[in-house]
Image (cartoon, rainbow, N blue to C red):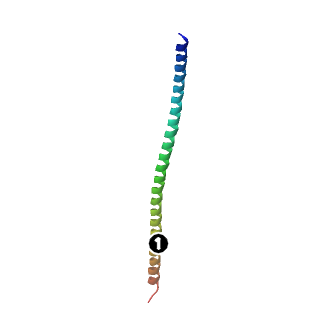
Amino acid sequence: MNKWQRAAAKAAKQAKAAAVAAGREADKLYKAARAKVETAARRRKLKQKLATTGRVLRAAGRAAVVAAVAAGVAAGRAELRKGTKRKPR
């Protein structure tokens, strides 16, 4: 091998090593970017689920208040009926 062939072989070897290192680095960056995207998607889904749960809980809370008021009214009426039956006329 002459001087130019050795230099070309050395340059090719260095280029190959640099390409392999660049590939490894690109793979790391790809994995990091993919993890961020998955995390963002998970966060978005979690926000949607929390919003839905919040709506359901608010509706359930309103229904509980309405039921409590209805039960109170019914109890009041029962007391009134009970009170009128006791009093002789």
- Please tell me how many numbered marks the rendered image carries: 1
**Along the viewing direction, whichever of 81 and 60 lies nearer the viewer:** 60
**Along the viewing direction, whichever of 61 and 79 lies nearer the viewer:** 61
Look at mark 1 in the image and give the residue it sits on.
69
Image vertical order of residue 70 relative to residue 56, above or below: below
Q: Residue at x 55, y 12 (%)?
A: 3
**Along the viewing direction, whichever of 4 and 71 lies nearer the viewer:** 4
Image vertical order of residue 33 relative to residue 66, above or below: above
Q: Residue at x 47, y 46 (%)?
A: 41
Residue furthest out toward the bottom = 89
Image vertical order of residue 8 relative to residue 45, above or below: above
Image location (x, y in percent) of residue 30: 50, 36
Q: Residue at x 48, y 64 (%)?
A: 61
Location of residue 14 by image quarter: top right
Q: Amino acid at mark 1?
A: Val
Image location (x, y in percent) of residue 46: 48, 50
Image vertical order of residue 67 relative to residue 47, above or below: below
Q: Residue at x 48, y 43 (%)?
A: 37
Numbered disc 1: secondary structure: helix
Q: Is residue 81 left or right of residue 25?
A: left
**Along the viewing direction, whichever of 62 and 10 lies nearer the viewer:** 10
Mark 1, Cα crowd under 10 Å, few <14 / some 14-19 / many 20+, is: few
Image location (x, y in percent) of residue 29: 52, 36
Image location (x, y in percent) of residue 40: 49, 46
